[in-house]
Amino acid sequence: MSKRHLGHRARKRFGQNFLHDEYIIDQIVSAIAPEVGQNIVEIGPGLGALTEPVAELISNMTCIELDRDLATRLRQHPFLQEKLTVIEADVLSVDFSSLLTNGDSKIRVFGNLPYNISTPLIFHLFDQIDVIEDMHFMLQYEVVKRLCAGVGDSLYGRLSIMCAYYCQALPVLMVPPHSFKPAPKVESAIIRLLPHQSPPVKVDSVKALEKIVSIAFNQRRKTLKNSLSSVLTVEQLSQSDIDPNVRAQDLSLAEYAILANLYEQTTKH
Ligand code: SAM
């Protein structure tokens, strides 16, 4: 199939798969439900498949686009250019607090994300969760499943646990490959991420939580007493009432929070 769409040649290195399915586009815009006065930011507007119907409903929005040609097209958009603030940048380097222009209202972020950077991007947004109202993203279905997974699910891991710490994750819509040009090889889905008002568990340091979770899952086949041996002793594990013989995928967010707090106390003394 041709890689050209609306006169643009899709760039694989930028994860460009453009939506062209009107039914799916309508469903996504309804799920986002943009309203005038909200601080709306789109990641990767591309050729405007979502930008156009969203911008029609509101008076202004910000778009972050890495591809210079696409950013230029949007700045010259025949009827939306007045409404769009186009930031030509790598979203991974964008400080979202600098986009809090609209009084105090937090940012509503959405996008059909470039799949090659989706996990680092989600972590980048988790780091800035304080300025985010909600997020609606198109992702590989597998990543949606990882985000929503709980203890016992096969895809439960670092992404699931950190997502549960920061947000409520709700799958919204499945999107088949033929809704895009070019069609990706994988199924996709829309997810809604609603940041918690306050975290569901108390941790003394989020960095410690991230560290413990990633060390445990880096050696997921080992028991905790082995995988965490560089950061917690067996005595500390037993003191926490957590069985040192279980594996990374057996622990809930609440149990990881206990381990992170133990670790943090040890490093403080
Ligand atoms: N929103 C459009 C749509 O739904 O048809 C395009 C989606 S396409 C999957 C991903 C978009 O993100 C492309 O426009 C691509 O150029 C842009 N992009 C890729 N990497 C990016 C990055 N690091 N920062 C900002 N935009 C990026």
Image: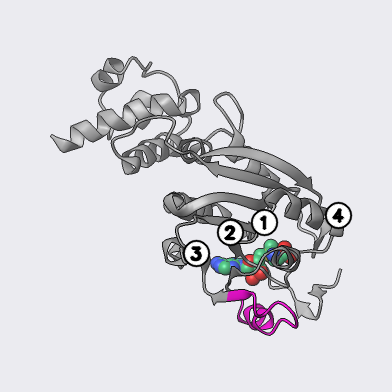
Q: Residue placed at 36% from the left, 17% from the top?
A: 242
Query: Alpha-carbon distance for marks 3 and 1?
Result: 15 Å
The first of marks 4 and 2 along the sequence is 4
Q: Write down the region rendered in magenta.
A: 67-85
> Residue 68 location in percent, x, y?
60, 81
Query: Alpha-carbon distance for marks 4 and 2?
Result: 24 Å
Is residue 160 magenta-colored?
A: no
What residue type is disc 4 on? Tyr
* Label 2 CB less than 8 angstroms from ligand 1: no
Which residue carries the number 2 mark?
38
Label number found at residue 23: 4
Q: Mark 1 or 4, which is nearer the eye?
A: 1
Which residue carries the number 3 mark?
102
72 versus 222 height, above or below: below
Query: Alpha-carbon distance for marks 4 and 3?
Result: 31 Å
Colour mode?
A: one colour
Does residue 56 appear left or right of residue 203 in this picture?
right
The first of marks 1 and 4 along the sequence is 4
Is residue 71 magenta-colored?
A: yes
Quarter of the image for residue 215 reads top left
Query: Alpha-carbon distance for marks 1 and 4?
Result: 17 Å
Does residue 177 appear left or right of residue 262 in this picture?
right
Q: Considering depth in this image, is 232 or 195 the residue closer to the camera?
A: 195
197 versus 39 height, above or below: above
Proximity of marks 1 and 2: CB atoms separated by less than 8 Å: yes
Q: Residue placed at 69% from the left, 73% from the top?
A: 11
Element marked by disc 1: loop
Query: Alpha-carbon distance for marks 1 and 2?
Result: 7 Å
Which residue carries the number 1 mark?
34
Q: Residue placed at 44% from the left, 20% from the top?
A: 246
